[in-house]
Image (cartoon, helix red, strand yellow):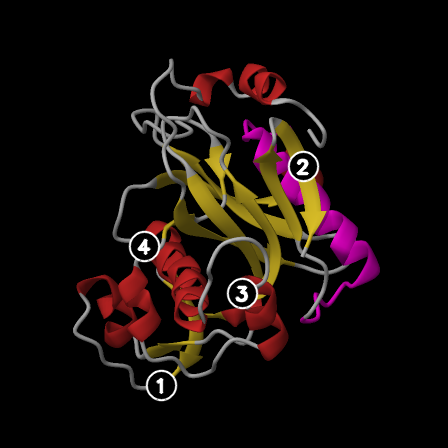
Amino acid sequence: MEGMTKADVDRLDKGLATHGGRAIRPRDAATLILLDGKANDLRVLMGRRHAGHAFMPGKFVFPGGRTDPADSRIPTATALHPEQEAKLIAGPGRTSEARARAIALSAIRETYEEAGLLIGRKGAFATARADWQGFAEHSVQPSLDMLRFIARAITPPNRVRRFDTRFFCAWRGDVAVELPGGGPTNELEELVWLPLAKAREADIPDITRMILDELESRLAHDPLLRPGGPVAFYRLVRNRFTREIL
């Protein structure tokens, strides 16, 4: 998709386009790609969005969703790695340290809400926030040091929803608790662990396929996904879909 025009992108993702109207300002969002396995036997967690959703109905996606600025005030066992924080703050837009923290924590919260997986370390945790009570009930302290920032993408204009999404990676071993019944929301169904090749063959959005390609390329050079690696940034610039490196 790199170098494509807005019209080209609209044709590819025509099911997501609106029919005119003023462009919507993108909102912060975060996605977490959970990996399980090693080397050539890696699997990723994906779930199918309900058909009734206005944004990407019926598509297989990674757990994720909109950032709540209040997430920045959630206590954590560990902070973002400094190199990860620097990558989140870099790039266009005013991303403060608090905003970067909220974005990262929203990826953890959404993974709990949609998949029932609590990322962090076992230990006493308390908060008044209702959407974080699962961590308190299961004594899990959210942790940010294991998150790896691998990509960023801004939804092109003329869409039903627009998001400025940051894609993070973590490993299944970073999950402190796996709830057998899944998460408390009904955002995703058919949660499955798919090999990378099978994930590409699923009914996924074009940007998801591109992020999988980015992930595989990075893993080929850095199987441990160490902090500070390159972050691909996709957006529309002067009517051309571009890829930059942060």
Q: Amino acid at mark 3?
A: Ile
Give the residue number, with chain letter if any, for mark 4: 113
Give the residue number, with chain letter if any, for mark 2: 242
Numbered circle sitting on residue 176: none
Cα gap from disc 2 to disc 3, whole angstroms: 20 Å
- Which residue is pictured at 21% across the width and 76% down the height? 127
Instruction: Tell me if label 1 and label 3 are in contact, CB under 8 Å.
Output: no
Cα gap from disc 2 to disc 4, whole angstroms: 32 Å
Comparing marks 3 and 4, which lies closer to the viewer? Answer: 3
Give the residue number, with chain letter if any, for mark 1: 123
Label 4: how many Cα within 10 Å (few below 14, some 14–19, many 20+):
many
Magenta part of the protein: which range?
Answer: 201-227
Label 2: how many Cα within 10 Å (few below 14, some 14–19, many 20+):
some
Lower sequence index among marks 1 and 4:
4
Cα gap from disc 3 to disc 4, whole angstroms: 26 Å
| Residue 90 visible | yes
Cα gap from disc 2 to disc 1, whole angstroms: 43 Å
Work out whether 73 lies above or below 16. Answer: below
Q: Secondary structure at mark 1?
A: loop
Give the residue number, with chain letter if any, for mark 3: 89
Cα gap from disc 1 to disc 3, whole angstroms: 29 Å
Lower sequence index among marks 2 and 4:
4
Cα gap from disc 1 to disc 4, whole angstroms: 20 Å
Lower sequence index among marks 2 and 1:
1
Q: Position of residue 217 (x, y in %)?
A: 78, 49
Comparing marks 1 and 3, which lies closer to the viewer? Answer: 3
Q: Nearer the viewer, residue 234 or 199?
A: 234
- Which residue is pictured at 69% across the width and 41% down the height? 243
Q: Amino acid at mark 4?
A: Glu
Q: Residue reaching furthest bottom? A: 124
Task: Answer left or right for 148 relative to 2.
Answer: left
